[in-house]
Image (cartoon, grey):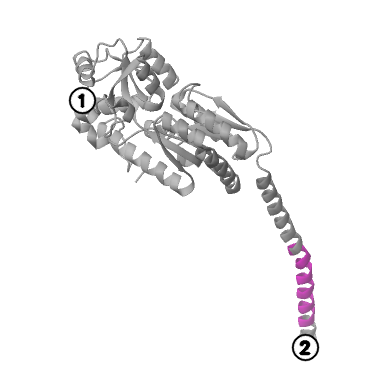
Amino acid sequence: MKKIMILGLIFIMIFAAGCSKKAEEPVAAASNELVANAQEKTQAADDAFPTKNISGIVQWGAGGGTDSLMRPLATLAEKHIGQSIVVENKTGGTGSIATQYVHDAAADGYTLLMGAENPQLYTMLDIINLTYKDFEPVIIIGDETVGITVGKNSKYATLTELIDAAKANPGTITLATTGKGGLPWSVASYITAVTGATFNQVPYDSDASARTAVISGECDLTVAKIQSGLESHLSGDWKYISLFSKNKIEKLEEVSLITDDYPDFDQFLPWGPFYGVFVNAGTDQAVIDKLSESFMAAFEDSSYQEILASFNINPLGIKGEEAKTYLKNWQLNTAEALYKSGSITKSPEELGLK
């Protein structure tokens, strides 16, 4: 009798297990179907991107160096992406207003950050807790040389004359800047470290505004990219008195290198601003790839290469991991230079860059 009962229990357990397995099969099939459908919808959305206009947010003001490079690039990229790219300037906070704005937007590829090097300095300077590590590079366009400029009627014909005046009268020589972390501030930090000269820094919302301040005589000097200041130099509206570089520029052969007057600057060079287009981290890779392909095609257009050449931009045209490596190395090298100069108090190790 016990054997019969045991056999009965075993039969019931086997039957129940079989029923359970049959019941799970439709559920598993339904689950697999849902996953497949979701993947198909995601792929379809990626293939359709973009279905509306794209916003391009420039960190600096209209007419500035960054703006002048991004607008023609966006116009060319539109032909390849299939939608309009509406370029908008959001100035302030050394570019951090635009950077935060794009970071707060959805990670869907419809809001692009069109920026320069500044976000790589934000955490060093406690501006905002964002860097390009919080974004994905669509393309790094290129980088360039910068120089120290004065107005056409300036009494300072050379950098040494300017430095000597600044040292003799600390804080009286006015430097037009774009704020802490901006290009003039960065180069001025190096000048202070090497020569001991200090300046009265007057902030403006863009390099174009800073340039106007020097041309009009409102400020004594600024630091300008070659692409944004060459025309004014050639026309005689202002003049470069020193290049922050180890190498001469063809159209500025008469301008001395900063290492000619102060060899100690050699330890900080080469150094200069760069330009790129970025999307939020977390954006689907297929969307990033489509954006990169479109912007790369625009970059390679002969008309855009002519623009880069006319602005004396060193063309890079890099994306993906190559772009990320470039960004990482630029940030580390700059942090080391600023730390050595005393412009920042935290070492690259303390900043988590090494």
Whichever of labels 1 and 2 marks the residue nearer the N terminus, that label is 2
Residue 213, image x, y percentages: 39, 13
- Compared across the picture, whether 201 is left or right of 133 comes to left
In the structure shown, which secondary structural element does the residue marked by tag 1 occupy? Answer: helix
Residue extent of the magenta highlight? 10-28
Residue at 44 percent of width and 47 percent of height: 322
Which residue occupies the foreground of this view, 353 or 302?
302
To which quarter of the image does residue 186 belong? top left
> Are discs 1 and 2 less than 8 Å apart at CB?
no
291 or 129, nearer to the observer: 291
User: Which label belongs to residue 173?
Assistant: none
Decide if residue 351 is in sight here.
no
Residue 56 vs 239, above or below: the answer is: below
Q: Position of residue 3 (x, y in %)?
A: 77, 89
The quarter of the picture where residue 8 lies is bottom right
Magenta span dominant secondary structure: helix
136 sits left or right of 243 in the view: right
Residue matched to label 1:
195
Residue at 57%, 36% (x, y): give it.
77
Q: Residues within 10 Å of mark 1 (few under 14, many from 20)?
A: some
As shown in the figure, which amino acid type bears the numbered disc 2?
Answer: Lys
Q: Nearer the viewer, residue 279 or 126?
A: 279
| Residue 47 magenta-highlighted | no
Q: Horizontally, is 82 left or right of 293 in the view?
A: right
Secondary structure state at the residue bearing disc 2? helix
Residue 6, percent from left and from top = 76, 85
- Residue identifier under label 2: 2
Q: Residues within 10 Å of mark 2 (few under 14, many from 20)?
A: few
Queried whether the magenta region covers residue 20, the answer comes back as: yes
| Mark 1: amino acid | Thr
Residue displayed at 78% across by 81% down: 9
Which residue is found at the position 19% from the left and 26% from the top? 261
